[in-house]
Image (cartoon, grey):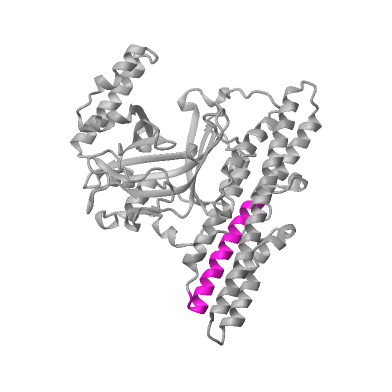
Amino acid sequence: MKFGLTLRTSLNPEWTANYVAYDDLKHFLKNEAANREWTEDNESKFIERLERELEKVYAFQRTKLDEIQGRITAETQEVEALCQNSEAEEHEFTESEIELGHIIADVHDLAKFTRLNYTGFLKIIKKHDKMTGWSLKPMFGVRLNAKPFYAENYDALIVRISSLYDRVRTRGKERGGDASAGGKQAAFVRNTTKYWVHPDNITELKLIILKHLPVLVFNPNKEFSQEDSAITSIYYDNDEFDLYTGRLEKTEGAEAIRMRWYGGMSSNTIFVERKTHREDWTGEKSVKARFPIKEKYLNAFLSGNYTTDELFAKAKEQGRKSEKEIEELEQLAQEVQYRVLTKRLHPMMRTFYNRTAFQLPGDARVRISLDTELSLIREDNDGQVRSGDNWRRNDIGVDWPFKQLPDKDICRFPYAVLEVKLQTHVGQEPPAWVVELVNSHLVESVPKFSKFIHGCATLLEDKIYQLPFWLPQMDIDIRKPPNPSFGLFRPEAIESSSISSG
């Protein structure tokens, strides 16, 4: 479908005048560049029109964003008053739920407005450069950066809306942990599935999920910043790619070893993690275990110069953990240290992403995470020094999109990664809304997708002999025709939709 038609069929009718006038700009190009030489005068007139369109789109996006933020602030006060009022009536909570439904729909529409207009500007500039032979892309890129309407990802709004929506849904009552979420291991079936999400669908997907599960916020007393959602992991392997091969082939006992931290570069606690694959015939489940270590001790630990006795001496003194817990952590640390030394493991691949996690506090029945801005980055020293003798490279932080890196060092993954973890009683069906979501047009199923494996297969292809089965999927357009009965609907349409909250 040509972009002009896509724009006309996708826009919000109430906002029509505020979209980039793509067709007008295209007609100007065709009329002026078709049969004659493009002149300085043509160029200046085109840039003038383009500038007006950019200013119009930018101003509208800022105005709508401010308006939505104001409505969220007003609704926060309203909900707070309702929750404090022991005599608040049901219809008052319903009215708040309806208003939040409208706010959610507006955030969705604004995110869509942003993506459509950004695509429109990129396409018309590309068309200009091709038709005229004049290069406008570098110069207009600077103008776009000065009015970055496209850089807003709406995560801060989503976190605020999620908290409000959850308070309204529970009618202001405290959530207790769900008793059925614990219990004996054998009583439950655990299942994890993975999906790719096209950038066009990311905001809509988040807004749909938050109607059922709140965004998990680890520090509710701190105002959300983008850095809070960052997760960085350094995966280790050897020159023979033993760990890569084991994870790809799903060999019994195959391990992944990584160093992980949360947030920005000021974080001085690093989690050393080991994932162990278990085959079904063993009757055991694959496990992830980890222990924390201060960043200043990590190099010494990995080289064998910092013992596990030293690592856990303070924990033993403080007595906050039981003797059994410390023993288990110490054994894990010894095994990881031994594996690093005997298998000659070194930094191989970094994964970076911003994670939005959805979960009812204390309830593990449904856990959903959505990882965006996924970047896979080389950490090995082959061909050039990257991590050197350190446990990670030091020339980058969490500054996505890592423009300072050469293309051969980074794969900027084009999709978000959705992970759905279900824990149900034997014979029990997953919640209907989850089934509907994972079968919808918004997601593309990719069983067993691994960020580490994808990074190695993409950036180190000449060094490995086996590639993952999902690589051919990268060459297809994963977008699907929308299902008119599934998606975000304004409150008037909620009763007849499959996404009604509850």
Give how far across and how far down residue 150 sits, in percent.
Answer: 56, 54
- 41 or 496, which lies in front? 41
Farthest residue to the bottom: give it.
Answer: 35
- 170 or 278, which lies in front? 170
Q: Is residue 264 left or right of residue 62?
A: left
Q: Is residue 132 left or right of residue 18?
A: left
- The residue located at (39%, 47%) in the rendering is 451
Residue 125: in magenta span: yes
Residue 113: in magenta span: yes
In this view, 153 is above or below 48:
above
Count of numbered badges drawn on the protein: 0
Residue 137 shows up from this direction: yes
- The residue located at (63%, 60%) in the rendering is 55
| Residue 71 position by quadrant | top right
Q: Which residues are magenta?
A: 109-134
Give how far across and how far down residue 230 sits, in percent.
Answer: 45, 40
Question: Looking at the rendering, in which quadrant would you find the N terminus?
Answer: bottom right
Q: Is residue 211 left or right of residue 264?
A: right
Give how far across and how far down residue 67 sits, in percent.
Answer: 70, 46
- 55 or 113, which lies in front? 55
Mostly what secondary structure, the magenta segment? helix
